[in-house]
């Protein structure tokens, strides 16, 4: 006596594919939330001369293969591009506009304004990622 067992894996493959698409979408959304948050935090830390540097900080997202990425930057073609690198990398003595901004935001304005936005907020960034992914899979 023989028993034949058959199982069509098409349904399994379809569900795995749907889960993969859902994860990809959730990861993209999480990176978008992180990019917006970090860009906002970086803007609070930018030195002020004319205000162009603060306005030129952007948060963008994309993909590198299967990896969702976020980038916070000052585009090289923006009005404050030449000022941006100098203010991020070199020693900086804050002027009156920067001192006023520092008082208003409660953040240290000046050197490493983008990297400090990340370093000062690692736990918040982690919570944004976890919460966004959790919401995506509660449904």
Image (cartoon, rainbow, N blue to C red):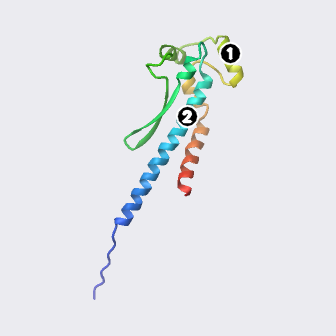
Of residue 90 and residue 11, the one placed in the foreground of this image is: 11
How many other residues sit within 10 Å of disc 1, few (<14), some (14-19) or many (≥20)? some
How many other residues sit within 10 Å of disc 2, few (<14), some (14-19) or many (≥20)? some
Vertical side of 44 occupied by 24: above or below: below
Q: Could you tell me how far apart the alpha carbons at marks 1 and 2 are, in whole angstroms? A: 24 Å
Q: Is residue 17 left or right of residue 49?
A: left
Residue at image point 46% right, 23% down = 75
Q: Position of residue 54 (x, y in %)?
A: 57, 21
Residue at image point 52% right, 34% down = 35
Q: Position of residue 126 (x, y in %)?
A: 57, 41
Q: Position of residue 66 (x, y in %)?
A: 39, 44
Quadrant of the rendered structure where residue 50 is?
top right
Query: Which quadrant is home to the C terminus?
Result: bottom right
Vertical side of 101 occupied by 35: above or below: below
Mark 2 lies on residue = 36
Q: Is residue 31 left or right of residue 121?
A: left
Residue at image point 55% right, 17% down = 52
Quadrant of the rendered structure where residue 125 is?
top right
Vertical side of 79 occupied by 20: above or below: below
Among the two numbered marks 1 and 2 on one chain, the one whose residue lies closer to the N terminus: 2
Residue at image point 59% right, 25% down = 43
Mark 1 lies on residue = 99
Query: Which quadrant is home to the N terminus?
Result: bottom left
| Label 1 vs label 2, nearer the camera | 2
Vertical side of 80 occupied by 22: above or below: below
Q: Position of residue 115 (x, y in %)?
A: 54, 27
**Secondary element at tag 2:** helix
């Amino acid at each position: 006596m023989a028993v034949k067992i058959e199982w069509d894996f098409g349904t399994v493959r379809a569900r795995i594919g749907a889960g993969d698409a859902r994860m990809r979408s959730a990861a993209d959304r999480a990176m978008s939330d992180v990019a917006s948050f970090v860009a906002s935090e970086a803007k609070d830390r930018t030195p002020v001369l004319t205000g162009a540097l603060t306005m030129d900080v952007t948060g963008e997202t994309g993909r590198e293969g299967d990896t969702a990425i976020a980038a916070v930057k000052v585009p090289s073609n923006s009005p404050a591009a030449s000022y941006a690198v100098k203010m991020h990398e070199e020693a900086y003595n804050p002027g009156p506009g920067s001192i006023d901004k520092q008082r208003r935001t409660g953040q240290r304005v000046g050197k490493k304004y983008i990297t400090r936005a990340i370093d000062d907020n690692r736990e918040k960034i982690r919570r944004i990622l976890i919460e966004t992914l959790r919401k995506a899979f509660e449904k």
